[in-house]
Structure formats: structure tokens, C-alpha cells
Amino acid sequence: MGTTERTTRLKNRCRFKHVAGGEYVDAGVKAGVERARLITQSHKENIGEPNCVIRAKGLENILSNITVHIQDDELIVGANTEHPDYFPMYPELSYFATLDMVESQYCDHKDEMREITEYWKPYTIQTKGEKYFTPEEIGIMYSATTIQPPMFVTAFSSIVPTYESVLEDGLLKRIEEVEKNIANANASLRKSPWNAQENLHYLDKLDQWKAMVIAMKAVVGWAQRHARLAKIMAENFLTDAKRKEELLEISDICRNVPANPARGLRDAMQSKWFTYLLCHSIERYSSGYGQKEDKLLWPYFQKSVIEKSDQPMSREEAVELFECERLKVSEHGSTKGRQLREFFAGSNDLFILTLGGINPDGSDASNDCTNAILEATESIITTEPSISFRWNEIGNTETKQKVFNCIKKGFGFPSIKNDEMNTQQLIKYFNVPEEVARDWALVLCMSPGITGRRGTQKTRSEGGSDVYPAKVLEIALTDGFDEFFSNIQLGPKTGDGAEFKSFEDVWNALKLQLRFAIELGLRSKDVGRIMESTHLSCPFISSIDDGCVEKGMDANALAEVPNPWHNIIGGSVVVIDSMTAIKQLVFDEKKYTMAQLVEALRNNWEGKEEMRIDFWNAPKFGNDDAYADAVATKYYDLIADEWKRNTTYSGTYPLPLAQSVAGYIVNGPKTAATANGRHAGEALDDGGSSPYMGCDKNGPTAVLKSASKINASKYKGILLNQRLSTVLMNSDAGFDLWHAYMKTWHSLDIDHVQFNVISQEDMKAAQIEPEKYTDTLVRIAGYSAKFIDLARYSQDTIIARTEQDMASGS
Amino acid sequence: MSKCEKCAFFFPIPEGDMDFEPGKGDCVRQQEDTKGKFWLSRPVFENSDACEHHRTQIN
Ligand code: SF4
């Protein structure tokens, strides 16, 4: 329940947009048509203009004409569609994703949307990008078996908006600055004598700057529309004096921001929310909620809550505002193709904010704003936004206790990232100055990136996209051909596994299949990047980045601070355990031959139960077992080396990121039987260093020791899921035990850990009487979901995770 | 035929606002469903033909 009557009411009537099994759970959820209609109308009127200007005018047409709304009780206003139950559509991105939505039960304007979808077909980044790939490559990518389909067809992206520049400057000041750049360029172009070398570069810049001005003015106008609506409501529709007063204050706030700098916490929250909507779901779609919220809002929290000098408010009111923010995010809808809806089982999208860590000067960055955000999280109980906490040795215990309080309640978050390790990664691999690196936040589930006024990540073609390693190992044993699911040649011909003579032969086939998948994935991202820069300019996103304004460049094109990464999603531990079993049973002990194994896997272990049990009982990762852990180390070094061979758009090699989202559930059914004793179709492991379900038998410290043998500093991140005992976590000694566990975790240089604290009994009871467990949350892998929104199959994978007893120590 | 101009839900846009145009206004209507009340605003012009929700201004 919320801390106030308002947030309790808002929670009770929250218009959640969670998906389960690829479908929206709430009956009223629909696809909004206004954004698609307005951007199409503008596109038709402006064809022939430079792309950035077309895009700016498209945004202007949306913001000037889309229906805006304010709901009862709201303190933060603004949405991405014409109705609070809707999510928007993006016909300019992916033809397939739009068509999937148009033909679904969620679209009520089928004829109009079919026409819009067809209109956009030649202009989509999908059509533009596809032509650089052969039909065979397209077939492999679209099968979503070894790699994720390219961003130009999934339309999936992620971004860290440069919130600071909006909150600190306000858009009117930035418009002035851009207009100054335009005036200077025009003056230079007219200087005598004519100098082409010095001036021709201005032509594109002038277009970019002009587009930025159009976009920023449209945004100010859109905020003014909200200001007018709040005032009209107060003066014409409502009788309650308190609500009228609130609406007049909301009106005043929307008049002030984002046009001007934020004065206090209410301005800052509203300005941040408008900026979020624009960058993540109006100008284009991008997943995430990347921000270092306690750093971003701390100056305004100080002014309003502590000093009470601007927009004064009590601490309780600040907590209420953070609760409102969580509910606003919970109502936020986004549209994605089916594969991604399935990937986010039980959720709506990925929303992850970051707290804690240290300040640029090295002091503890956890402050009372951090604490208020955590208190709001603990009281309102929503799955979104998830939180990542940067665990630093110097972090204060009071905040760590509040982190513990959320974890012990079973939210599955905050997830914990190793602050020192992630800061060092940005310094070492991406040349980020230390004081800038110290302000990092997660871009999406697991990957750190810088925050601030410039150089933040703007597109998933920089980071993101997936390789699915369990499937890659499967085809490494079948000459690159997928016999189980797609029936196509997914990779190079690396030989029939039945004929492999040594363990090195297996490694080599795995390496070559991985290499092919990695390179195809990277090429598709970089081709997508060019398509985004050329055909999908984002003038608003560019206008709030100091670097883009200075250089007159589109945000997709500018890679001021490289931050490339690439995911290996769900299945790494299946590969490790499978390779370990092959090494032991085929090549060391010679109990079975490769021919027998390949045949058994092809037949899903049918008639070979004894053999399957042998493979299942082979050493497993997660038990501090030297034999299995040596394979894990070798596998993870191989992965890092393979990515290191490549150079991406931003001029350096990407770091791999081992995690899962719900990929371990979605990809399980596409993956044949594996040599770890798993049957075909069963779930994969749920993250980078999470032991396979039920295979960690030696206690929590053994899991940590196994995880610590992987050199996490070569990675963007390596996910570790742990299930902890509810009884212990809720005991008097709970915090001390957990704190001691966390100290061990930190001392072992592990990158990440997140916890499920829910009993087997409660999960089983929730399966029988779901209506009694509406607030029961669980951690999937990178995000949390309501347990009852998950499909039975997904629920069972969480029940099957080993519950660790921290008190046992070993 | 009635025009938006005479409708109780028509509110002219103040001069000086970014989206000001002569004759342009906000059409603001209250809606309610099982999850509560909300208010919608969309741009209309005073000389647009009134819609089925038109309500005559009292003053
Ligand atoms: S559109 Fe209808 S409700 Fe709106 S102002 Fe015009 S007549 Fe009134």
C-alpha cells in the first residue's frame, strides 16, 4: 500500500500494461493510433526535406495534436498516447513489428493502420537495412535461434537521456544556444573570401540545428498544453478545493518545465518525466529507465525537502512523489513484436534506475534522496521500475539496510552491481575520465554507461543485441545445421560432432559457430546504426546533448563516448555444464563416444535414461568444483576473446554481457537436448553465472567461489541469481547475515548479484490461489515480475532454483 | 450547424503559447471508466463543426 491515501488509490486503479505469454494481461490495453497517424501525415507533407527536418516536423505534429490527458489524483502528468490504457505504435521503425500489432486483438483501427503500415514499408529502417544481407543471413537472424533478430526488425532500442541538461538549462536557453550556432554558421558561410573546406560542413549542421529548434519548441508547446489542461480542469471541472490547488500547481510546473531550469523537486520530477516520455517513447521507442536518480534529483531534493527554499515540501511528500513515479512507470505502455513481449514475461518493458555508489569526488553518493526512493519502493510494491544499487565499500549502512528491506520483502531488487569494478570498466575500456565514470548508471538491465549532459548512450546499436550460446553449442555438434527447430543452416559447416576426436575439436567447432553468430550480430547492429543515423534522426534527443549541439550532429550518428557491448543470453551455464560433461565422460573417462552422445541428444535421450543421468551427474558449475569451474573460465575467456576480434561503429571492440532477461524461458523450447543432461525444450540457465536450476548443492559460498573464478573485468556484466531463505532474511540476524554475505561477494570481485526471497510454499500456494498473491513479486533475470502474471512454465523455473541458506556459510 | 466555438468544452489557446493560432482551442472533456476519471484535451478550431458531445455554453 502507498504511504498516503492518494497513492493507495492510484495503486488500486493502476492501469498496468504487463504482458504474459506475449499478451497484455489487463483487458483494456489497446494500441493507440494517434502517434502513427500524425507522424504519417507529417511525413507525407514534408517528403523532400532533409531527414532530420522531416523527423522534427513529425515530432512537432505529434506533440501539437496528440490528445493529452490527466488522470484523477495524479501529481506527475503526461503520457505517450491519447488514452491512459493505450500504448503507441511506430510504423517508421519495423514493418514486421507494426504489422504484428496491427493484426493483433489490440488494434481497433485495422484498416487505417494497415494503410499506414503499407505507406511506411519502403521507408522503415527494416526495409532500408535488410538489403545489406543475403536471404540466408536474413533467415538465420529472423529465426531468433542463435542470435537476436536485428534492431531494424525488432525496433528495440535503449537510451540514457541527458536529463541533466534539461533540468539544469531548460529548453529555452538551449534553443537560444542552437540559434546562436545557426547564426555563426550563416555568418561563416558568407565570409570573404569563400573557403569551401571551412564551410561546407555547415550545410548538414544547419539542417541538424534547425531540426533541433523545431523539436525543442514543439516540446515546450506540448508541456504548455498540459499546463492549460490542468488549469482548465481546476477552473471548470472540479469542485474539491485541495485538488484544484494541486492542479493549479501542476499547471504552474508545466508552464515552467522543461522550458526553464527546474526550481525544486516537483519541477525536476515533471521535467524528467516529460524528457523520459520524449526520448523513450514519443520521438522513437527505446526501452529502459537509465538514470542515476539519486544524483540527478539530489540538488532539487535538497532545495525542496531539506532547505525548503524552492517548492518546499515535507519528506513524506517527497516519498509520495517517488511512489507516484513508480505508478506512472507501471502504467507506461510500449509496443514490441511478439519475440520481445515473450522475452519480458510478466513485465511490460525493462525499466531500471540506478542508485548508490560514489560521487565524482569519491564520497558516498547515497544520500537522503536515495533513502526516500528506497522507502517509496518498499511501500508501494510495484515491479517497475527495477533498481540497481551500486555496492561500494564506503556506502553507508543506513542505505544498505533500506536496500536489504526491499530485497527481504521479495521484490527481487535492488539488484547489486560492484561499483568499483563497473567504474573501472568504463575507465579502462572506454577511456572515460574517472570523475565522469563515477556517475555511471545502468543503461538497461546490467550494463553500465555514463550519465550527464553529453556522450550518454543513445541507441541499442551501440550496446545490446544477443547471442544464444546453448543453441550455438547444439549446432556445433550438427555441422551448423539446426535439426531441432528451424531446419536451416544456422552457421558454417564445422563438422559432425559424432566424428570429433578430441575435446579441442568440440571447442573449435563451438568457437567457429560463436564467431559466425557474433560477427553477423555485430554487422547487423552497425548496419542498423547507419540506417538510424540516415533515416531515423532524433532531433530532440540530439538537442539535449551538449556534444550534438556543439557539433551539429544527430545523436544516432555521434559516438562521443563509445560503450559497445553484446549480450550472451541464457545458456552459458548449460554450455559450461555440457562441455564439462563431454570432457569427463567422453574424453577423460571414455565412458561414451561422441557418436553415442550426438545420437542420444538427437533423440532427446530416448531410451538412454541411464546415460542421461550420467551426464546430469557430471560436475556442475556453482559448486566450487575445480573441474567444472576450469571449463567455465575457459568458456568465458573464449567469449571475451571472440568479441575482442571485432571493431564496431564507435571504433572499439564490444564487451560481452552474460545475462538472460526471460531468454532462458523463451529459448529453452527452441533448443534440443543438451549434454548437461537437460531434455529438449526445457528451460536454460537464468543468467551468466547462475548455476543451472537445482545444480548448486554446496551452499552460497561455493556459488560465489565458482562465480569468482570467471574474470568479470573482461565483461560488461555477468548476472548471478540467488534464492535466499525467507525465514533467515526475516529473522533478527537477517541483515547481519546478508551484509556478511555481501562483503564476501564484494571481496571476491564478482560483478553482480540479485536475490529472490520467496518460499517454495508461497509460490506453490500462489499457483493454486493467484488472487491472494497479487503483490508477490519475483526476480526473473534483469527485471522483476508479478509471480501470478508468469506462465506456469516460467513459475516452475523459479520454484526449481536452489534456496540458499546463508547461515550455513559453506 | 453548431460550431466548436459555442461549445462549453472549447477553450481558446492564449496568445503567446507555442501552439497558438487564431481560432485554435483545446477541446477538454471528462471521461470515466472502471479505473477512474480522466480529462482529455485535443486541439480543435472554433469554426470546426461540432461533434456529438457538443454542449452549449451557458454564458
Ligand atoms: S469537438 Fe465536440 S466536444 Fe470538443 S469543442 Fe467541439 S463540439 Fe465541443
Image: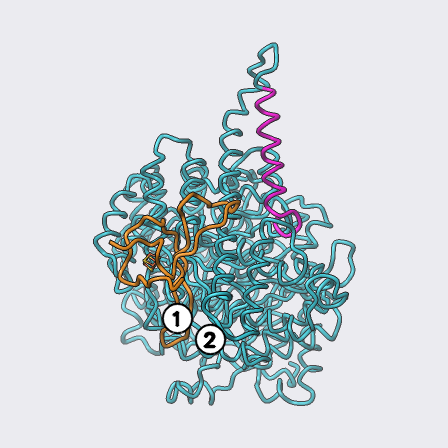
- Residue A184 in magenta stretch: yes
* Image position of A707 (left or right of A149): right
Q: Which residues are magenta?
A: A166-188
The x, y position of residue A41, in whole percent, is 32, 43
Determine if residue A642 is in view. Answer: no
Nearer the observer, A472 or A171: A171
Ligand 1 shows up in which quadrant of the image?
bottom left
Nearer the observer, B56 or A644: B56
Q: Residue furthest left?
A: A111
Q: Amino acid at mark 1?
A: Ala
The x, y position of residue A58, in whole percent, is 40, 43
* Image position of A686 (left or right of A480): right
Q: Residue furthest front?
A: B59
State which chain is coloured orange. Answer: B
Quarter of the image for residue A362 reads bottom right
- Residue at image x 50%, y 62%? A230
